[in-house]
Amino acid sequence: MTSRDRVLAAGRSETVDRIPVTPYMGNYGASLVGVPVDEYGADASTMADAQIAAQRLVDHDMLVAQSDGYYMAEALGMRTTRRPGTTPAPVGRPLANLAGVDTLAVADPWRDGRMPVYLEALRTMRAAVGDRLAIRACGTGPFSLAGHLMGPDMLVTTIATLSIEPDARVDRRLRLLMDVCTETAIAFAVAALESGADVVMSGDSLASLDMISPPIYEHWVWPYERHFFDCVRPHAEQRGALTLLHICGNTVPILRSMASTGAHVLEIDWKVPITTARDETCCKPLMGNLDPTSVLLQGSPDEVLTASRRAIADGLLETDSGEPAAFLLGSGCEVAPATPVENVRAMVSAAHEPTAGPSAMDQRP
């Protein structure tokens, strides 16, 4: 199987020759080959070349066109500043309050902000690697995008206040904001599929239960994520591609709701035990979940190898119903730029071991 075949098959719960290994190596890919991150995130060919060069060094299965998370927000009016060697930082939110939300319009991924940079990077990578490697697009989730536009503290505080002091006008404006953010995310994901992505995602970091409560997730996040996947999944399946949902941090209380969004794959962070995610989501394909800090960044290669073997063994455990388990070994979140390359290679080597294939069920190290 090619790397691309392997990723797509695992995401469909089909038989694979070995576990796909898919660290989220956006800016890390740039740092690994010595490309300044400000240049990497602003130029499509630089991004594509860095990802391809980094893959040659690590030998993982999936490239990713990703840098910072403001490429959609800029298209919707956020002002950012750029300094050499850093990702953009916000300097002006388009919605200091909700009064201006009525003028907000869905952004065009082919024209607005830096979305075209990411789409061109996808096309360049696909042309360069053909069907050999899988390619993942980035994708800011609707709730996170709304947080970029308002400011995350302002968004969460407004929602919390609304639950105590109902206000029909505020409710309407918040829902309009979420609608615009969701439709923008959908438009970008569809454009990414048309540009050659094999995996498109909703990465809703602000929806982490480290940031909000389960009731806020159920009321203000889940309906929009469900709409996102309802709209995007048919486009993905038409092209043989996958959809993915990632929410950072501890998501154990909402795992079943996440599984019901319609995403093909759930990417779980290091705070979620793989066995718990398997219990809560049954046979849903899972991706994860090495700790990017204490394991990949700060650990030794032997520690990374041990953690990777454990993740694979847990990910391949049969469900209670006897359904086959589908698993892709990944980082819980983005690999930190200073991570030793030997550690990422150790992660990859664990997936390449003979005991890391489908026959490894129940073979715990």
Image (tube, grey):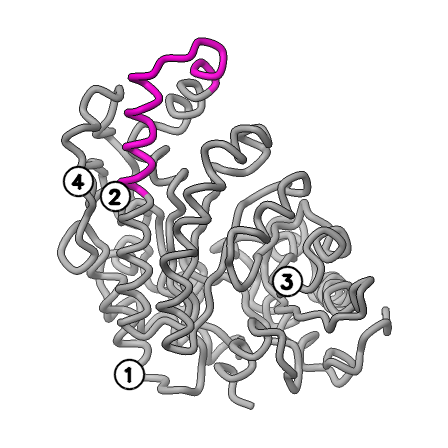
Q: Label 2, on which residue?
A: 83
Callout 4 amino acid: Ala
- The disc, 1 or 4, on the residue closer to the chain's N-terminal end is 4
Task: Work out how far the residue at label 4 is from the one at label 3, CA to CA, in angstroms.
Answer: 35 Å
Q: Label 3, on which residue?
A: 284
Nearest the eye: 269 or 142: 142
Judged left or right of residue 103, residue 161 is right
Q: Is residue 92 visible?
A: no
Seen at 45% across and 60% down, the residue is 28
Task: Work out how far the residue at label 2 is from the one at label 3, CA to CA, in angstroms.
Answer: 41 Å
Give the structural element (helix, strand or loop) at label 4: loop
Q: Which residues are magenta?
A: 160-181
Give the structural element (helix, strand or loop) at label 3: loop
Judged left or right of residue 221, residue 6 is right
- The disc, 4 or 3, on the residue closer to the chain's N-terminal end is 4
Seen at 64% across and 57% down, the residue is 289
